[in-house]
Amino acid sequence: MKKSIMITLTPPSRSRWRRFADDLVLTILLNTCAGVLVDLVFGQRQELYSQVVYSLTVGVVAVAIIDGARLLLGDHPAQRRRWRMPLLALGVASALVGHFSALLIGGLVMGDSWPAQARYPAWKFHTVLFALLSVGATMLLILSRERLERISAERGEARARADAVERQALQAQLRLLQAQIEPHMLFNTLANLQGLIERDPRQATHMLGQLILYLRANLAATRCEHIALAQEFDAIAAYLALMNMRMGERLRYHCVLPDPLRAAQLPPMLLQPLVENAIVHGLEPKIEGGEIAVVAAERDGALQITVIDTGLGLPDAAAMDADDSRGVGVGTTRERLQVLYGERASLVLAAHQPHGVLARLTLPLEFA
């Protein structure tokens, strides 16, 4: 089934009331500083208190009007464009309302009919200009902050969308990898099975049973994003049993999975490419064959799985190159680990002494 990716872009996650309260707090801080600055530059020290009262009143009244209207009218981009000019006109009007409110409220706060500014005409140019500039600067800062929040949210959603696309690509790559592994395995196994049917029917029946176990384990695994480590080991054990029937005494193997780690979670088919590489590139070309061990353990809070073979080993050049890729499976495994876990997971290939290859897979230890 084809899945589509749909991520809805949303405005900043704060509620309208929370944003309104945050805007008022920012307004109080800015206008307090503005009142102190204006008094230091133009006023007299004894008028500092009245100037701060005036500045605060202008800012709070004006921002409460325009910011409240802006949030109530809507925050969708289409709504913001529709109300842009009316809100601009409301901003100018709110600055004037804030100016006259400051004269009235300031007088009440100061215990006088008018505050110190009242000895100037109410329409004195510099006081009205101060109100307009103060409100304009405050709203500009508020809008800039919200724009940055929106851009940050959109970037986060774009990253999430890209990650989702990459995960889908990896799933497709996993299915392709499975399609590459299974026919190769099936053809060889069926060819051996055909010869065994006449020579040794009991052995042929046993091989057919192992093949069914292997296919069932892989089919169930590839339908899930994560599986239990015990399921992965069951699939590997079935695969190794089939290879043992083909290679006979040339292949010896053992798997070690401690009981506490049986329920540990990991992406499906992480081990299959490593085990297949060990056999195809290491043990099958070697006349006397060899041994392969798959061991799971906990190391420093992480899950560590090692696949060790006593085959031909890495070529000299590859032994010096940490990015050696013995077949498409190793490269795919590294890409999957990078996307799913980032720097928390790794796959290391190294020479195993006295001969052979050690593949060490490390990933976070997680349980369902």
Image (cartoon, grey):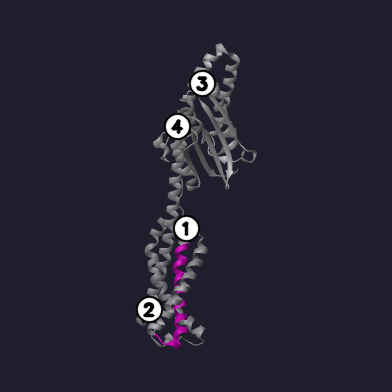
Q: Residue at coordinates 45% horizontally, 34% vertically from top-left? A: 329
Front of the two marks 4 and 1: 4
Q: Earlier in the sequence, mark 4 or mark 2?
A: 2
Q: Earlier in the sequence, mark 4 or mark 1?
A: 1
Reply yes or no: does residue 156 show up in magenta. no
Q: Residue at coordinates 56% horizontally, 43% vertically from top-left? A: 303
> Which label is found at residue 228?
none
**Amino acid type at mark 1:** Pro
Front of the two marks 3 and 4: 3
Residue 43 visible in the picture: yes
The answer to whether the residue labelled 4 contacts the one labelled 2, judged by CB atoms less than 8 Å apart, is: no
Tell me the crowding category of disc 4: few under 14, some 14 to 19, or many 20 or more residues within 10 angstroms, Cα based: few
Using the image as rendered, state which of residue 175 and residue 128 is in the foreground. 175
Separation (CA) of disc 3 from disc 4: 20 Å
Separation (CA) of disc 2 from disc 3: 90 Å
**Amino acid type at mark 2:** Val
Query: In what element is the residue under mark 4?
Result: helix
Image coordinates of residue 221 in percent, x first then y, are 55, 33
Q: Residue at coordinates 52% horizontally, 15% vertically from top-left? A: 194
Q: Which residue is mark 1?
A: 12
Q: Which residue is mark 4?
A: 176
Tell me if residue 190 comes above or below residue 63 in the rendering: above
Q: Earlier in the sequence, mark 3 or mark 1?
A: 1
**Amino acid type at mark 4:** Leu
Q: Earlier in the sequence, mark 3 or mark 4?
A: 4
Tell me if residue 60 comes above or below residue 159 in the rendering: below
Image coordinates of residue 13 in percent, x first then y, are 50, 57
Give, as a single range, the part of the protein colored magenta. 43-71
